[in-house]
Amino acid sequence: MASQRTLKKEIIAEVMRLFDEALIIRAVSGSEAMQAEIEDLMDDIMVFTDDSLRRVTHPSGKHNPQLVKAYYRDLGHYIITNLTSFSERLDDFVEGL
């Protein structure tokens, strides 16, 4: 397992990449409706970031190594799934330009 510090840095790096891409798409889009949708996506990304960072530091089953390992495995799946979803949503906006 990677350290919590490393995991947090990786989450923040990926989220910042997505957030930067969303800012660029928002700046390029001319439609007010699309800008509002992108801002909603950016809000979702920020909520995801806060939730993920909180979950990294508070594993369940702290004294049972098997439970901690399962917790971080599930957390990794949660993070990858959401990052992929955000990336796909951004790709849809790019296609709509």
Image (tube, rainbow, N blue to C red):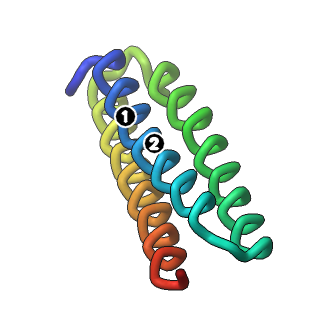
Query: What residue lies at 36% left-to-right and 53% top-to-bottom?
Result: 80
Crowd around label 1: few <14 · some 14–19 · many ≥20 (10 Å)? few
Task: Identify the secondary structure beneath mark 2.
Answer: helix
For badge 2, the amino acid type reads: Val
Query: Which percent across, then down, holds residue 57?
Result: 48, 19
Choose between 77 and 12: the one closer to the eye: 12
**Residue topped by disc 1:** 13
Looking at the picture, does residue 80 appear above or below residue 61? below
Query: Which percent across, then down, holds residue 35?
Result: 71, 66
**Residue topped by disc 2:** 15
Query: What residue lies at 64% left-to-right and 59% top-to-bottom?
Result: 41
For badge 1, the amino acid type reads: Ala
Query: What residue lies at 72% left-to-right and 59% top-to-bottom?
Result: 40
- CB under 8 Å between callouts 2 and 1? yes
Query: Which percent across, then down, holds residue 60?
Result: 49, 27
Choose between 11 and 55: the one closer to the eye: 11
